[in-house]
Amino acid sequence: MKLNFSFLKKMNRNTILIAVAIIAIVITGGLIYANSNHGFSLPAIFGMSDSQIGKKVVDYINNNQLSQTPATLVSVSEESGLVKVKIKIGTNSFDSYATKDGKLLFPQAFDMSPKPASASTSANSGSAQTPAQAAASVKKTENPMLEAFVVSSCPFGLQMQRAVADAVKNIPSLASNVVIRYIGSISNGAISSMHGPEEAQENLRQICIREEQPTKFYNYISCYMKKQTATAASGMPLGDSTGCQATSGVDAAKLSACVSDSSKGLAYAKKDFDLSAKYNVSGSPTLILNGAQISESGFGGRSSDGVKSMVCAGFNSKPSFCSKTLNTAEASASFSSTYSTTGASGSTASNNNCATAQ
């Protein structure tokens, strides 16, 4: 079939140029309107809108059981060429990212842009500081409190628990200036944790022992983290809770009553979780000293001496035990029968944690 373009002969050159110009103006105007009007966007025409991608992210997390607690959508925006999706799981909020076609999800992103040095960098960041510098910029009080937020199956949470337990063992009075707290959430009367229900129940047991049988707490966790005896459905390791209750002298009946009574166990846990949300805790372990986040790397890492040094940095007037040197080696991560497997200080494990978005 032969196409007939004879109509073009009837159009002069100026008419054609004017028509092209009009088409260009219409396209340009449409692009400007699309980018400036929040109710109209090109992705809505040619692909998925940002709000649709946000809903898809939440549905994917919930439908694939990536979280023990249902995720809800908080907000959607665009950042660095991706769709930034803020979701809420329990009491914690997380930023995830997705490609604009809605095909790829990134649960976590790392900001690689250079961080300029400023006066706001303090011991609470701990980066590239000497111990003296880190200690000097810590807020001082008469009775400082170091709060270590962990979950009971995280290898690095166990590492911090081990360092704290060893510090308290060698300086018992430190027990009044340091507390191990737990990360999680409560929904419909059920406790949840980042690594599944088995970890959540162990967190609850440890919380109950800490609150109602405090003299047995450090003996119990020191026993519990010595040996893995089971594996959770999530693949995370579990210790021997029943055996350690016996060897550490825990009143099992009292513990069972606490765990099963929501006015006790869950109420204690909620206080931890509320504090976790207040401090924007995002990983296990996270350390809070006198109400501000602090990095252990400025104090020698995850060692019992590092724990002591952080607490002592928070005193207006340092007590005599601050002159005592404890173990400077990094504590072993995960389950271990010994305090340290390397005997070396300054391990890079101090930079690792279990993220709450898992």
Image: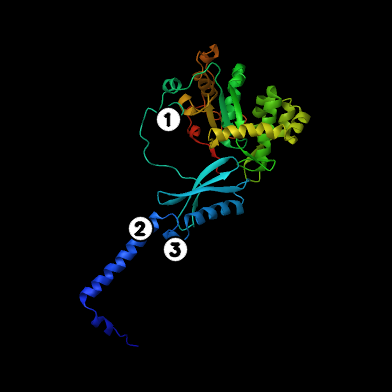
325 over 149 or under it: above or below: above
Mark found first going from the N terminus, 3 or 1: 3
Q: Residue 45 — which label?
A: 3
Closest to the camera, between mark 2 and mark 3, is: 2
Q: Amino acid at mark 2?
A: Ile
Q: Measuring from the top left, give residue 187's x and y in whole percent.
A: 66, 42
Q: Quadrant of residue 255?
A: top right
Q: Which residue is mark 1?
A: 127
Q: Which residue is mark 2?
A: 32
Mark found first going from the N terminus, 2 or 3: 2
Q: Amino acid at mark 1?
A: Ser
Q: Amino acid at mark 3?
A: Ile
Q: Quadrant of residue 19?
A: bottom left
- The type of colouring in the image is rainbow
Give the SS element for disc 1. loop
Mark found first going from the N terminus, 1 or 2: 2
